[in-house]
Image: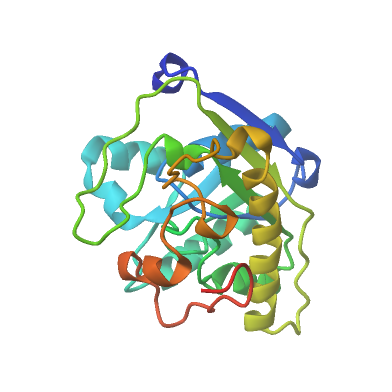
Amino acid sequence: MALRALQVTSRWSGEEHLPEHGPVLLASNHVAFADFLFVGQAALARGRHVRFLARHDVWHAPLVGRAMTAMRHVPVDRRAPAAAYLRARALLREGEAVGAFPEAGVSHSYTVRALMPGVAALARELDVPVVPVAVWGTQRLWPLRREAHEPSPRPDLARGRTVDVRFGAPLRVAPTAELVTTTAELGERLTGLLEGLQRLPEHRPRPGEQARWYPRHLGGTAPSRRDARALEESPRSAVRPTWGPPD
């Protein structure tokens, strides 16, 4: 209802890469808190209801927590992630579509940051395809901080925004695949999909615009990848980027 009131245009492409049946992992980049809404909406075009892995503290709000449980989403406690892994594995064995944001948090640089290897591990164990997904435009609905001392910005109520979701070709993970190498390949694919959306004319800043919502290496004024590290928290097990722009 709120998105309709704000006249948000939701578009998706590449949905033919998402299988209509059977277990599948969706691995999406993460640029705003509302990303899962748009990825989930796009997946419905293929008749798939995605069960997302999400931060466990979302369940602390009783009404929200009950809704998340009813929709079979999975809480992730970063300090003890094994339970989420096991739950995601069970859902995949039931033939569900499971969605993950392997960056383990939003990217303040709007590039693909360090990735957790859990998606590759699940795909290797169960022999399920990984469909990389890029989402772009949500960062304009709910901006991020640029400095650690800044308060978190409120949602932007400007009307007429466009959000794009793009599905990429499935990645198959062999039983003998090395997790770091596979995760790096996923990072490369996500970067290609994301930059393809970022370079669309309707998503580029106007000439001379100070676009804090657009990546620095493409001409925006978002934090560089190096500066963004002060705003981001990545577990030690995350695979550091060998993809995307230099720091």
Q: Is 8 rendered above or below residue 238?
A: above
Q: Residue at x 75, y 43 (%)?
A: 21
Residue 46 position (above or below residue 113): above
Residue at horizontal 35 percent and vertical 49 percent from the top: 144
Which residue occupies the extreme top position in the image? 5
> Which x, y percent locates residue 44?
64, 32
Q: Is residue 4 among the parts visible in the rendering?
A: yes
Judging from the image, the colouring scheme is rainbow
Q: Residue at x 55, y 71 (%)?
A: 118
Number of on-image labels = 0
Q: Is residue 31 left or right of residue 136?
A: left
Q: Mark yes or no: residue 81 visible.
A: no
120 sits left or right of 118 in the view: right
Q: Quadrant for the N terminus, please.
A: top left
In the foreground, 100 or 166: 166
- Answer with left or right where residue 113 lies relative to residue 189: left
Relative to 32, does residue 78 appear above or below in the rendering? below
Q: Which residue is at the far front?
A: 208
Q: Is residue 132 above or below residue 240?
A: above
Q: Position of residue 19 (x, y in %)?
A: 77, 45
Residue at the image point whose x is 62% and y is 82% from the top: 180
Front in this rendered view, residue 8 or 121:
8
| Percent of width and height locating residue 241 | 57, 75
Q: Within the image, what quadrant is residue 201 found in?
A: top right
